[in-house]
Image (cartoon, grey):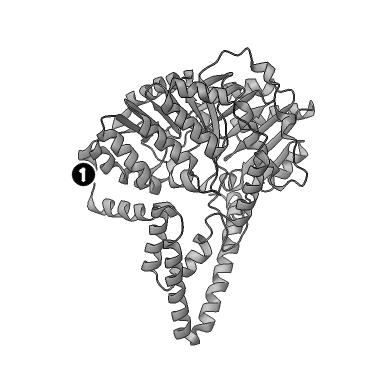
């Protein structure tokens, strides 16, 4: 590493934040050592704190695996475990985010509505599909649509090509919300178009996650965007606090153009997502494009986030396209975009996956970069396989995070033993988050099959019923399996004991990782 890069690293946000947190930790420890003459009193206070925290955790209405992980940690470190939980685990979601989410959700009531006739039509056609659609409407507040054209993109390259073409057509507004943005071929090409559109008078807004972009974008990048006439916000900025809350990230990927075109899926705005650079072999990802009525839900998702800290809220209806534009669109099945928030007690992303698994009669084909699941999802997958449903999971062969990959492989044995088929994508890394069942239903979105997506992150997806996306996704999935390795039970059994032990320990603390 050259001197210039070393200096850049030392003055980077990551390094500065880490240094300030370590200073705060050192200060805290110095207080403890200063009071060491009162060791007996402090010892009993810390032990009592650990006991109180354990009782508190056990009685909380949270995922059992999350509670087990923290109680185990406290038992392993009874002197400091309670203090660690108080600093880092006690508030899984900051109060500020809960308050903002609640107010924002209240603002949506009366703005978003469901056509009851459409729900009735689906119920007559397929009562099982209706239950899933009804769940998303009643518990996620996002309605079911028709009059929407859909396009499936099997790779980031095809999504990027379509994205450029659609951005160039923008006349009124462009909304972008992404977890990761990194300067390079993909983002620089998009940014040039955004700047040109801004000069033409098109309203351009950009929202990105601070943790996702840390180390990828220069410091104060939002200020640069505003100088380019692009309205820009950073979600949940990372600040150097010892008890900081970094868990709740905006993991969504949303593009909305003029309220007519919308895109989402797993693809961020960085070069590995279009295979312009190689990081972990071939990068396999997916996305969808919507044109029509269903784009309204994606528009509302973005505006809901954007208006968190605005004194004067947007008039959302100014960004709703005229429904008359879509009346002549040929119906492409049923389309239902939805989002999931960690600030409520409704695990929409996980429940949608479980609903689809439980509803399947013939097959469940899913892809995920991380297979770090709780007992609820694991039970649904194994029970479906035991019932004779063809359950297949596609995961990476070349990982981006080795410890998460160890957790992923640690989940293989029980699933395979129950009849689930697990494939590793040998050309590289799978980042796609998809599920398709019985040639009827499909989901494409940002939701991994892991604790972070299910419980901690802001996520989004689109549920499809009898849409051409269902067929396209299945065809692409089967092509991927041709390039993948089917993991056998013998391979799982032949893992060395030390590796099994590491996986077991990691699995115990999986909800915290």
Residue plotted at (44% across, 27% down): 129
Snapshot quadrant of residue 142: top right
From this viewpoint, is residue 284 visible?
no
Left or right: 241 in relation to 53: right
**Residue 355, image x, y percentages:** 41, 35
Mark 1 lies on a secondary structure that is helix
Whether residue 160 is visible to the viewer of this picture, yes or no, is yes
Residue 134: image location, x then y, percent:
50, 32
- Percent x, y for residue 246? 55, 53
Task: Locate residue 501, reporting x and y percent.
Answer: 28, 55
Q: Quadrant of residue 80?
A: bottom left
Q: Against 238, is 418 above or below?
A: above
Left/right of residue 65 with respect to residue 122 in the rendered view = left
**Number of numbered labels in the structure image:** 1
Question: Dot 1, crowdedness within 10 Å: few (<14), some or many (≥20)?
Answer: few
Front-lying residue, 222 or 302:
302
At 68% from the left and 20% from the top, the residue drawn is: 323
Residue at 49% over, 69% down: 83
Mark 1 lies on residue: 493
Image position of 360 with respect to 62: above or below: above
- 51 or 119, nearer to the observer: 119
The reply, left or right, for residue 481 in relation to residue 110 is left
Residue sitting nearer the eye, 409 or 123: 123
């Amino acid at each position: 590493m050259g001197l210039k890069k070393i200096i850049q690293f030392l003055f980077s946000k990551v390094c500065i934040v880490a240094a300030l947190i370590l200073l705060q930790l050192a200060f805290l420890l110095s207080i403890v050592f200063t009071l060491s003459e009162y060791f007996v009193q402090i010892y009993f206070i810390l032990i009592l704190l650990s006991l109180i925290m354990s009782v508190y955790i056990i009685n909380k209405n949270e995922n059992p695996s999350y509670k087990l992980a923290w109680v185990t940690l406290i038992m392993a470190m009874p002197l400091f475990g309670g203090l660690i939980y108080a600093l880092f685990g006690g508030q899984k979601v900051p109060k500020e985010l809960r308050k903002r989410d609640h107010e924002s959700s209240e603002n949506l009531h009366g703005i978003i509505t469901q056509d009851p006739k459409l729900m009735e039509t689906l119920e007559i056609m397929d009562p099982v599909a209706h239950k899933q659609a009804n769940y998303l409407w009643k518990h996620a507040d996002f309605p079911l649509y028709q009059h929407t054209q859909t396009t499936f993109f099997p790779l980031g390259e095809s999504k990027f090509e379509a994205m450029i073409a659609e951005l160039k057509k923008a006349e009124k507004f462009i909304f972008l919300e992404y977890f990761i943005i990194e300067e390079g071929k993909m983002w620089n090409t998009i940014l040039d178009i955004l700047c040109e559109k801004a000069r033409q008078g098109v309203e351009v807004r950009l929202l990105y996650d601070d943790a996702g972009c840390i180390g990828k974008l220069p410091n104060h990048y939002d200020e640069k965007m505003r100088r380019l006439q692009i309205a820009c916000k950073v979600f949940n900025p990372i600040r150097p606090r010892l008890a900081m809350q970094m868990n709740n990230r905006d993991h969504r990927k949303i593009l909305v153009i003029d309220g007519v075109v919308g895109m989402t899926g797993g693809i961020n705005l960085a070069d590995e997502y279009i295979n312009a650079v190689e990081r972990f072999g071939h990068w396999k990802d997916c996305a969808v494009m919507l044109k029509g009525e269903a784009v309204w839900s994606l528009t509302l998702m973005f505006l809901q986030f954007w208006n968190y800290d605005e004194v004067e809220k947007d008039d959302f209806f100014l960004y709703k396209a005229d429904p008359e534009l879509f009346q002549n669109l040929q119906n492409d099945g049923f389309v239902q975009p939805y989002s999931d928030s960690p600030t409520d007690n409704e695990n929409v992303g996980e429940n949608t996956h479980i609903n689809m698994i439980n509803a399947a009669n013939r097959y469940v084909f899913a892809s995920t970069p991380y297979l770090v699941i709780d007992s609820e999802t694991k039970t649904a997958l194994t029970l479906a396989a035991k019932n004779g449903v063809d359950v297949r999971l596609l995961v990476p062969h070349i990982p981006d995070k080795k410890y998460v990959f160890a957790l992923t492989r640690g989940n293989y044995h029980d699933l395979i033993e129950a009849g689930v088929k697990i494939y590793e994508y040998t050309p590289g890394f799978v980042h796609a988050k998809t599920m398709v069942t019985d040639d009827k239903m499909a989901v494409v979105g940002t939701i991994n099959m892991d604790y972070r997506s299910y419980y901690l992150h802001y996520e989004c997806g689109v549920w499809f019923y009898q849409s051409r996306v269902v067929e396209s996704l299945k065809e692409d999935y089967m092509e991927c399996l041709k390039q993948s390795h089917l993991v056998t039970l013998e391979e799982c059994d032949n893992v060395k004991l030390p590796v099994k032990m590491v996986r077991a320990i990691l699995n115990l603390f999986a909800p915290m990782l």
